[in-house]
Image (spheres, rainbow, N blue to C red):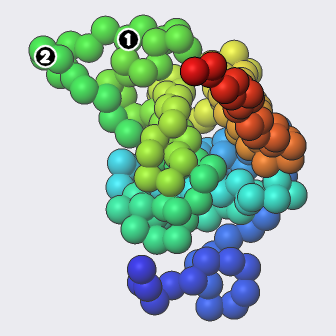
């Protein structure tokens, strides 16, 4: 599908930069953007940053401020391993003014306040999702609440992808067993 915009690092293409395809590289890039992007704040749930892990695993590419529908309709949506990062509000039940906070990282998916949501995609299929705990000052860098859960998420997702790639490679490289012909029983002539 041609949308008039190309992806990559040449002039005239969607702005991007290379990052290391390691948990540390992804965490550093994601938290740096979440902590300084005004666009993700102002157009929460609409604009997403995107990290594409390239097929050769030699690098990842970080794209900023893309509408999710555009990502899914573009060539990025065909990739087998990419992440979207956005700020989103949760669902408030009952009185929206009387919300009880539960500031535990394990309960971040139930947060009704603006908080980061990171999703892993394979093509247009969502594979995994992580919610980071909201922060009243909009600073996502606390070791236990933000950095550790994000590092663990990226580590787990990268390892799962590597395992899948190894299984695929092993299946392709494995010699196929020779087909055996069914043994044909000798025919014995019957006596008249």
> Which residue is at a point 68% across and 70% down the rendered structure image?
16
Q: CA distance from mark 1 to mark 2?
A: 13 Å
Within-10-Å neighbours for mark 1: few <14, some 14–19, many 20+: few
Residue 48 location, x and y as percent?
48, 55
Q: What is the number of the mark on residue 95?
A: 2
Foreground of the two, 183 or 26:
183
Could you tell me residue 167's position as x and y percent?
Answer: 76, 36
Q: Label 1, on which residue?
A: 101
**Image-based side of 20 in relation to 118, left or right:** right
Does 41 sit above or below residue 103?
below
Which mark is first along the chain, 2 or 1? 2
Q: With respect to residue 166, does 183 lie above or below?
A: above
What residue is shown at x 51% (from left), y 84% (from top)?
Answer: 5
In the visual, does 27 lie left or right of 46? right
Q: Quadrant of residue 101?
A: top left
Counting from the top left corner in percent of width and height, residue 139 is at 60, 35
Circle 1: element type = loop
- Tell me: 176 left or right of 185: right
Viewer can see residue 78: yes
């Amino acid at each position: 599908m041609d949308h008039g915009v190309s992806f990559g690092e040449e002039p005239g293409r969607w702005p991007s930069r290379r990052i290391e395809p390691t948990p540390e590289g992804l965490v550093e890039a994601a938290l740096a953007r979440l902590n300084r992007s005004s666009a993700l704040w102002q157009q929460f749930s609409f604009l997403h940053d995107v990290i594409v892990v390239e097929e050769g695993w030699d690098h990842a590419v970080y794209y900023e401020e893309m509408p999710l529908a555009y990502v899914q309709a573009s060539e990025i949506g065909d990739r087998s391993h990419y992440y979207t990062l956005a700020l989103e509000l949760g669902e408030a039940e009952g009185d929206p003014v009387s919300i009880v906070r539960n500031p535990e990282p394990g309960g971040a998916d139930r947060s009704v306040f603006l908080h980061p949501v990171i999703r892993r995609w394979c093509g247009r299929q969502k594979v995994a999702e992580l919610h980071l705990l909201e922060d009243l000052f909009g600073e996502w860098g606390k070791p236990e609440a933000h950095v550790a859960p994000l590092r663990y998420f990226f580590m787990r997702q990268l390892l799962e992808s590597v395992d899948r790639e190894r299984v695929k490679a092993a299946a392709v490289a494995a010699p196929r067993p020779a087909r055996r012909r069914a043994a044909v029983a000798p025919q014995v002539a019957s006596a008249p």
